[in-house]
Image: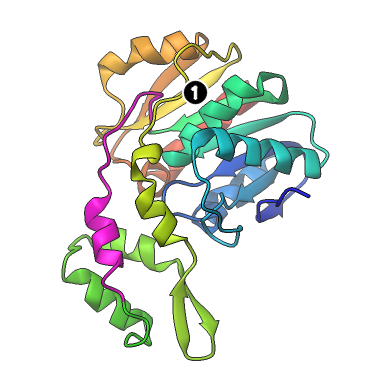
Amino acid sequence: MNKILHSTIIGDGHPLFILHGFLGMSDNWKTLGNKYAENGFQVHLIDQRNHGRSFHSEEFNYEILAQDLNTYMEYHDTTKAHVLGHSMGGKTAMQFAVEFPEKLEKLVVADIAPKYYPPHHQAIVTALNTLDFDEIKTRSEADKKLSESLTDFGIRQFLLKNLFWVEKGQLGLRFNLPVLQNKLEEIGEAISEMETFGEPTLFLRGSRSEYIHPNDATLIKKHFPKATIATIDQAGHWLHAENPKAFFIKSLEFLNR
């Protein structure tokens, strides 16, 4: 039997699947997930493989991640859903859309384009590899160690959400760092060259982010001919966390259209 992704399901109504980004987890979307649930959606906050509470695996690319979502959908007896994905989760969502278009109604992609991105997480991965949990016994000690090379407090807090007690007195990280650091090239991969999704799609970009450039519009429209691209003001790559009100309003308006 195929392994099933871990999720938290909130509310009743039309299914909305939410996919986190690289080194994230479903909990990152809990606040917004509750808001979607309050507005008539059955929200599935999903941990992708090698992240959160989902299973670990040596296999990791967007075709496999899209198949994971399809398997999850079948397990939960869901024939059609909306899908929202951020960053790496947005790539998974796009790949799912072009591979399983009959199972997707509307697609929301947060701050990522269908293009190739060179590996750019090396500094974060290097910092994470300095965490020695034989020595580090508290969250504050882990933060202090990360701060030696990662000066951004917000990024450190995002990463430290993954800390958990493996057993009494022994901390660990939920994501599968050894595999993920070996798959940085795959995480930047473009979606398949000739594939398209013909249903309504919303791309939301952060005004201070460089992940979606104006000249990406042609490629986006090639793969997603019914795409709209909108900007979330006063936000960078983590636009849903930096300006959640604007993100929620624009995404909800699109989903309800």
Q: Is the residue marked by circle 1 packed among few (<14), some (14-19), or many (20+) residues within 10 Å? A: many
**Scheme of colours in the image:** rainbow
Q: Quadrant of residue 36?
A: top right
Find residue 65 and report its horizontal and vertical position in percent: 56, 40
The answer to whether one can see residue 123 in this image is yes
Magenta: predominant secondary structure element? loop
Q: Amino acid at mark 1?
A: Leu
Find residue 34 and report its horizontal and vertical position in percent: 62, 51
Q: Quadrant of the C terminus?
A: top right
Q: Is residue 52 left or right of residue 142?
A: right
- Is 35 one of the magenta-colored residues? no
Tag 1 residue? 202
Say which of 255 and 169 sits in front.
169
Name the residue rendered at 24%, 32% in the picture.
210
Q: Is residue 111 above or below residue 46?
A: above
Find residue 76 and report its horizontal and vertical position in percent: 80, 44
What is the secondary structure assignment of the residue under circle 1? strand
Q: Is residue 157 left or right of residue 8?
A: left
What residue range appears in magenta? Answer: 112-131
